Image: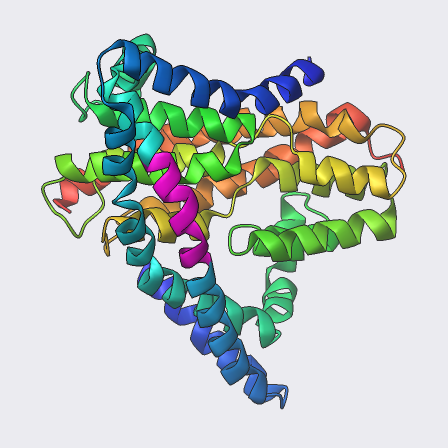
Amino acid sequence: MFEVIAELSRWAIPLILLVVPLTAMLRGVKVYETFVDGAEAGFATAVKTIPYLVAMIVAISIFRASGAMEVLVTVLSPVLDFVGLPAEVLPHAVMRPLSGGAALGIASDIIKTYGPDSFLGRLVSTMQGSCDTTFYVLTLYFGSVGIKKYRYSVILGLTADLSTLVASVFIVRVIFGLAG
Amino acid sequence: MVNFVWLAMIVFGILVAGAKGNIDVVTKAALDGANDAVKISISLIAIISFWLGIMKLAEEAGLVRALALLVRPVMRFLFPSVPKDHPAMGAMVMNLSANILGLGNAATPMGLIAMQELQKLNRNKDTASDAMCTFLALNTSCVTLIPTTIIGIRLLYGSTDPTEIVGPTIMATAFSMTVAIVVDRILRQIYSRKGG
């Protein structure tokens, strides 16, 4: 099953690159000119995201470098203890929506310290795999079309992230038990 | 909300740095952050240009519409405000599929194309539309089936079964996607009553 999906992933892009231009040609589309027409907007789209990403990444960067994250972890600890989240994975949980690279670093550290087949190792692996960098995605996607008012999408994204956390703890506990 | 989170990260960060006596890290962190942000945007030029070209071909060939047609029942339920044969539907499906297959460098450009299509339907150009909120909630809660990076790390530290977390990951993702869809509906109701 996993091998099939992995294989599918390897073939997906080459197949798209084969099927799309061929189909276009059969439908009488001028393939080269159309590709160039489309690609023309790439520069403007990418550059448009600069101010949004600068704003968000500067804030995240200050937050991380100052040590504010550790303070937040201490404050949040009793709350997350309540939902059964071990304190060791809390830094990962806080960092995951903000910075993919930082979260991966924390996850890697936990796996190294406690072992990949321990409860904490499995839990942080599941958390890393099932969450996304919510803030980065929101900033980039909204920024590319010039949206400044995000309405309820921040609270929605964070609710989904929190539900992943709770689900991860529950699922890993049920499947593997607390052993390790 | 985004205003609050943004300001809170900066103010809280500076206060903590000051209290810990390492206020110098703030300036460096700010400039490094800005630098990283520009690097990310610039590196996006290449993949976005490339995928915009391919997507334009797919659109002219009628493939985006065909794809949208294929998953119409699900997409109509999720995005009632988007016309059923709109190119946005095709682009969103492409983005979500690329996400699931773990094609990170294809997923982002397709997502941005979907946002451009959704923006065409948006009446308030500086405010997120209902469909955009739903799309981003799905996008951030739906992730790859095979988390290759984390499997690699598990392998590196001697796991006896590095891929054993794939099942739990998919289950956790399915749960959070369900939560995202339900909470999205509730918030949409609340916010539309507020008139915002």
Of B157 and B192, the residue lying toward us:
B157
Main SS, magenta region, reads helix
Quadrant for the C terminus of chain A, please.
top right
Q: Which residues, given as a range, are shown in magenta? A: B40-52
Q: Is residue B97 above or below residue A109?
A: above
B27 vs A90, left or right, is left
Per the image, is B97 magenta? no
Residue A81 spot, x, y in % from top left: 67, 50
Of A166 and A24, the residue lying toward us:
A24
A23 vs B161, left or right, is left
Can residue B56 be seen from the camera position used here?
Answer: yes
Q: Is residue A87 above or below residue A69?
A: above
Residue A76 spot, x, y in % from top left: 60, 60
Which residue shows up at 54% across the image and 25% down it?
A: B101
The part of the image, by quadrant, that contains residue B188 is top left
A58 vs A41, left or right, is right
Of B155 and B192, the residue lying toward us:
B155
